[in-house]
Amino acid sequence: MNGQLTHRPTAGSPRAFRSVRWPLFLALLAFPQLGFALSPDETLLFERARAIAAAPVDDFSGLGASAGARDGYYRYQLAFLAYGVCSVVEGEPGLRAQAAALFARLVEKMEQPETLAYWKALGYPGDGLTNNNVMYRGHLNLMYALAHDRFGETRFDRRFHALSRALFDELGRRQPICCEPDQLFVQCNAVTALSLALHDRAFATGYAPAGKRLLVWARQHMPLEGTTLVREDYRPSTGQSSAARAGFANAWTIAFLAPVPGLEDDARAMYADWRRTFVLPVPFYGVVRGAPAGETLTTEEMLTSSLLATTFGLLAAREAGDEGLHRRLERTVTMVDSLVKTLEPVLPSARRAQARTFRTIALFARTFRGWSEVIKAGHAFEPRRALSPRPANLGVGAN
């Protein structure tokens, strides 16, 4: 038209495929959930993920964009929704086709500049894509891993290989990877360790020892005395660490390291110490301390720390098969989630973003079947041949 030639894609060309795939993708996402045996919370999670995935890739309105909030926490919402989708499919395989389409869309949104915009908004140096920032890069790599492992999706494999190699190399340095400038959290590195174990399973690489080295380093440099646990964070510039949110940090770490080959005994020992140190003997409801007894916290710090520890405690309890504690913690998280839902509309912008993120993680925690179940042996797709010779041993005892 207007004197310009238009190119009609030939049948079978990538462009022709894309022109067909988009309507099919929308049709899959629009398919009703009738007839599937999901719990109300699983249905809610799947429908929320589906609504977010159905929007254009650069549309983040479904994640509740908050004007004025420097950090919308999109990375956490997208990652935990994606993990929840994998859990839903494990319970209802009939949803696999729909789940594969929306999971790939969540990965694409995770890669968007909007998801990473918080890094510069908070004044951190660099672009947040190279070195440091394992909180984003670790979740992204685990999403790449699950796309391949759970759904046989290969379009992200090249990026999965490159990011896995980079993360493995960084974990093999003097210390694990920082999440923010001069602040290191073991739980974020645990996400990376799980992603590397899945890379090993798919491509016969040798990345999994990174998880063991992570624990050895953490117990040397930031131990929670008298236990197999670790403190919340570590400042490389000073060697100082805090235990203010150790209950939460260890619950998250246990949940994500337990399925990594070779760390099963570590996870069991850590869970026993975590339960003894942080779980309060409350009937009917479950409550987890955010910090060890004797740690000095303000009231707000104590409540926030305990809420995080209780929520992530759901994941640790499920991974450990501690169903009694899981049921009690679930009652508490459900009750708090209802309260936060009521308060969310009247909160300031930054707090509203935090509340929305908590509600997403709480929904995930209530529905998640546990990594050992979701990625159990006999997984969805057969491993491929090794990409290259196995990497050299990490040297577990090295500093």
Image: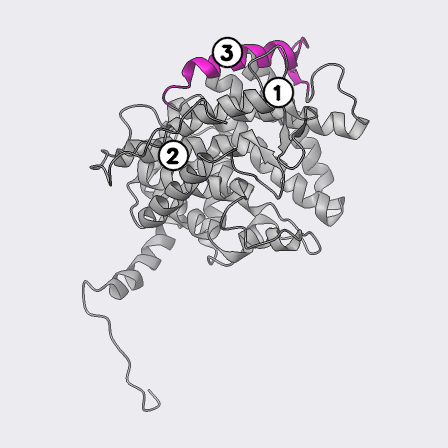
Q: Magenta residues?
A: 261-289
Q: Position of residue 68 (x, y in %)?
A: 71, 55
Q: Is residue 265 left or right of residue 356?
A: left
State the CA–CA distance, disc 3 to disc 2.
22 Å
Q: Is residue 131 left or right of residue 184?
A: left
- List the residue tagged with mark 3: 269
Can you tell which mark lies on residue 83?
none
Q: Is residue 361 left or right of residue 123?
A: left
Is residue 275 magenta-colored? yes
Question: Closest to the observer: 341 or 390?
Answer: 390
**In front: label 3 or label 1:** 3
Q: Position of residue 252 (x, y in %)?
A: 54, 26
Question: Closest to the observer: 203 or 351?
Answer: 203
Asked if one can make out residue 3 in the rendered structure from this viewpoint, the answer is yes
Q: Secondary structure at mark 1?
A: helix
- List the residue tagged with mark 2: 196
Question: Closest to the observer: 73 or 132?
Answer: 132
